[in-house]
Image: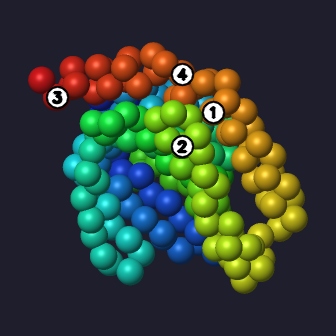
Amino acid sequence: MAIPKEGSNIQIHSYKHDGHLHRVWEETKVLKANRQLVIGANDHTLVTESDGRTWITREPAICYFHTELWFNIISMIRDDGIYYYCNLGSPFVYDKEALKYIDYDLDVKVYPDMTYTLLDEDEYEYNRLHMGYPEVIDHILKRNVDKLLRWVRQRKGPFSADFIDTWYDRYLSYRS
């Protein structure tokens, strides 16, 4: 697998289990990259949905992707604190075109006080049946929801106190 170059801009593509393109983030600055991990940042970036609709993100965000975890974490920096949107999905691959992963519908929203809400369980159940998610994927995703929630409770990885400050400062250094 290729490794994106730190300081470069990449696209992020999410797909659905059936292979169709779900969403594209046009530009994310790579802050750290190695064979297992990509940390990126974006602000007011163009997002294109599978139906062609577009929108612009509203705030700076730090993005965390890993090759061994079945989730990724988007940390949104807002005036009233850090909000986290966590997508349950396949580990990422990078192929020089984009960072890519399969979105498996389940999401966890984490608030600045570290309370959280599991989202889209109905969508997951519908797609699990209609797209034929294998049972092994269902088990992997449920284990990774548990792992993700442990990270939240333990303030691990992107949920740690210094993570966002460190990576947002790095992002700002590229913008100056």
Q: Nearer the viewer, mark 4 or mark 3?
A: 4
Q: Nearer the viewer, mark 4 or mark 2?
A: 2
Q: Could you say which is closer to the camera, residue 106 or residue 134?
A: 106
Q: Is residue 122 above or below residue 166?
A: below
| SS for callout 1 | helix
Identify residue for label 3: 175
| Residue 135 place in picture, x, y as percent | 87, 65
Identify residue for label 2: 110
Q: First in sequence, mark 1 or 3: give its number.
A: 1
| Cα distance in 3D space between marks 4 and 3 | 24 Å
Residues under numbered marks 4 and 1 in contact, where contact means CB atoms less than 8 Å apart: no
Which label sits on residue 12?
none
Q: Badge 2: how crowded within 10 Å, few (<14), some, or many (20+)? A: many
Identify residue for label 1: 152
Q: Could you say which is closer to the camera, residue 59 or residue 103?
A: 59
Q: Residue at x 51, y 53 (%)?
A: 100
Q: Where on the picture, by quarter, is residue 54?
A: bottom left
Identify residue for label 4: 160
